[in-house]
Amino acid sequence: MEAFSLNPPKWTESAVHAFQFCCPKCGATSMEATAVWINRRSPVYTENRRRKWQEFYHCECGYIWWAWSSDRPPSKYARESQDIAEENEDDLDGLDLDLD
Ligand SMILES: [Zn+2]
């Protein structure tokens, strides 16, 4: 699944930081993006000791934007994908050990 691949897809290079969790150009939500990539390799620690990371979205309108995972509005679906991400993180940690 591309969303959790370790290396950024080419299209993320031209991403623009969106300060609200939707496409700055057309206002579409992340659920409508045609491609997603989550930068799990470089988490940032917030003041609450929670981690956040960059989430890149390729909008259906062609615009490419990214936002912090912590800015994602809470929803049933967001929480579920967060849980999946946490589980995948364990896999990634194991992968790091193997590689080192
Ligand atoms: Zn858009």
Image (spheres, helix red, strand yellow):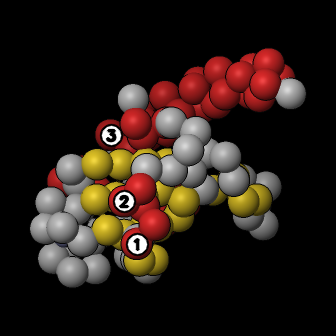
Q: Nearer the viewer, residue 42 or 47?
A: 42
Image location of residue 87, percent across then percent down: 58, 24
Amino acid beneath label 3: Tyr
Query: What distance separates the C-alpha of mark 1 from that of mark 2?
Result: 6 Å
Mark earlier in primary sequence (2, 3): 2
Q: Is residue 56 visible?
A: yes
* Tag 1 secondary structure: helix
Q: Are marks 2 and 3 in contact (CB under 8 Å)?
A: no
Q: Is residue 83 visible?
A: no
Q: Nearer the viewer, mark 3 or mark 1?
A: 1
How packed mark 3 is, by other alpha carbons closer than 10 Å (few <14, some 14-19, many 20 or more), is: few
Query: Is the residue 84 above or below the residue 52 in the image?
Result: above
Image location of residue 97, percent across then percent down: 83, 23
Query: What distance separates the C-alpha of mark 2 from that of mark 3?
Result: 25 Å
Image location of residue 58, percent across then percent down: 28, 59
How packed mark 1 is, by other alpha carbons closer than 10 Å (few <14, some 14-19, many 20 or more), is: few
Q: Which of the four quarters of the rendered structure image does ligand 1 lie in?
A: bottom left
Q: Is residue 26 left or right of residue 50?
A: left
Q: Which residue does the numbered mark 2 point to in the structure image? A: 11
State the residue at coordinates (72%, 60%). Answer: 44
Outermost residue, right direction?
Answer: 100
* Tag 3 secondary structure: helix
Mark earlier in primary sequence (3, 1): 1
Query: Is the residue 77 above or below the residue 56 in the image?
Result: above
Q: Are marks 1 and 2 in contact (CB under 8 Å)?
A: yes
Question: Can you tell which mark lies on residue 77?
Answer: 3
* Tag 2 secondary structure: helix
Query: What distance separates the C-alpha of mark 3 from that of mark 1?
Result: 27 Å
Amino acid beneath label 1: Ser
State the residue at coordinates (79%, 25%). Answer: 99
Q: Which residue does the numbered mark 1 point to in the structure image? A: 14
Q: Nearer the viewer, residue 56 or 85?
A: 56
